[in-house]
Image (cartoon, helix red, strand yellow):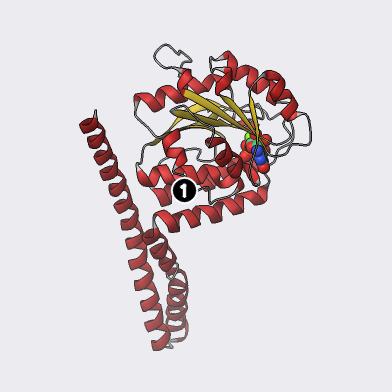
Amino acid sequence: MTSDTSEISLRDVTVILPTKNEEEAIGLVIDEILSVGVPLSNIIVVDGYSTDRTREIAQEKGVKVILQEGKGKAMAIATAVKYVKTRWVVIMDSDYTYPAKHIPDLLRKAMSENLDEVIGARLIGRENIPAIFRLGNWALTKTFNLIFGTSLRDVLSGMYIVKSDVLREINFEMKGFSVEVEIAAHVASTSGRISEVPIEYRKRLGEKKLKVYHGVKIFVDIIRLAWRYNPTFLIFAVGSLLLIPGVVLAGYVAAMYLLYGIKCWAKGLLSAILCTTGLNSLLLAIFAIYLKRAECRILQNIRRLVERLCA
Ligand SMILES: Nc1nc2c(ncn2[C@@H]2O[C@H](COP(=O)(O)OP(=O)(O)OP(=O)(O)O)[C@@H](O)[C@H]2O)c(=O)[nH]1
Ligand SMILES: [Mg+2]
């Protein structure tokens, strides 16, 4: 990807910067965003009641600084969206980890492929993500892909571009750091127009707010989102868990017969029922994913058709 901005206009982009005690980084982040050509009036710092000089520094730079409603990163974004007047919104962490040079890359990809969301996948400088978070990101992204039929590499990235109309459709029900999965789940399930561009990730300045336990909350929220957007998959996925006791019981029955010649009819019947139900559920869960993918593709084509007819 290049940072050539000739065929795109950064006037169409608002950059939302959620902040919570980011005095070390916020000034540098704003300077970098301005240096790539985003107008000063298109930068919104949405602060979560920082107790350091974050708001002061941002105000000195001349950008719009607002205090968020409620608590957490998700509510910060929900607050800032109300101030957006441009067609596109870039959301990025204010901790200097995400280089602003990728803003044009995100916009170019979104515009050229008519996407609703483009995520900056942290593929360069991955050593700057602590190992435990790298593992967590990988596991959560795989879970997300499985449920929503996507093939993303970094669903939890803190830098992405979204169409502002689409961002306004979000309920912001998933609090805090789950906001990224809620936006991606919505886009994947409604239009399917979601993709990524590889970006660089730098070492963080200041104190990290995301803790390991947040990973568990994000996992639970992915399951909640699955219930909202793909309940059939979730029901059958849970049903497929019957395979586990079914196989264990079948092993026990087989061992009793082979080792001692004892025939456990009742247990054998029960294990057969558990295995058959579990296997059926597993197949139906896989089928539900494929149905979801087909639904996304159909919706995508309908939207394209409507756009063409309206053009
Ligand atoms: N407004 C607001 N911003 C927050 C809140 N919590 C975190 N942030 C900001 O949201 C961004 C993401 O938080 P980080 O601590 O960087 O968490 P992360 O990006 O998931 O993790 P790393 O970047 O790997 O450290 C940062 O810019 C934080 O300052 C909050 O409650 N309110
Ligand atoms: Mg961060």
Q: Amino acid at mark 1?
A: Phe
- Any atom of ligand 1 within 8 Å of the CB at mark 1? no
Q: Residue at horizontal 48%, vertical 43%?
A: 183
- List x then y, in percent, for residue 16: 57, 30
Q: Which residue is disc 1 drawn over?
A: 144
- Seen as rendered, the residue at the extreme left is 309
- List x then y, in percent, for residue 204: 68, 30
Kindly state the secondary structure of the residue where label 1 is placed. Answer: helix
Residue 216 vertical position relative to residue 106 in the rendered view, above or below: below
Figure label count: 1
Q: Residue at horizontal 45%, vertical 12%?
A: 4
Q: Nearer the viewer, residue 197 or 42?
A: 42
Q: Nearer the viewer, residue 22 or 169?
A: 169
Quadrant (top left/top right/bottom left/bottom right) for the C terminus: top left
Q: Residue at horizontal 26%, vertical 33%?
A: 307
Q: Residue 23, can we see it?
A: no
Left or right, 129 with respect to 270, comes to right
Residue 229 vertical position relative to residue 76 in the rendered view, above or below: below
Residue 268, quarter of the rendered image:
bottom left
Q: Residue 238, can we see it?
A: yes
Left or right, 286 with respect to 218, comes to left
Q: Nearer the viewer, residue 108 or 256?
A: 108
Q: Residues within 10 Å of mark 1 (few under 14, many from 20)?
A: many
- List x then y, in percent, for residue 162: 46, 33
Q: Whereabouts is ligand 2, in terms of quadrant?
A: top right
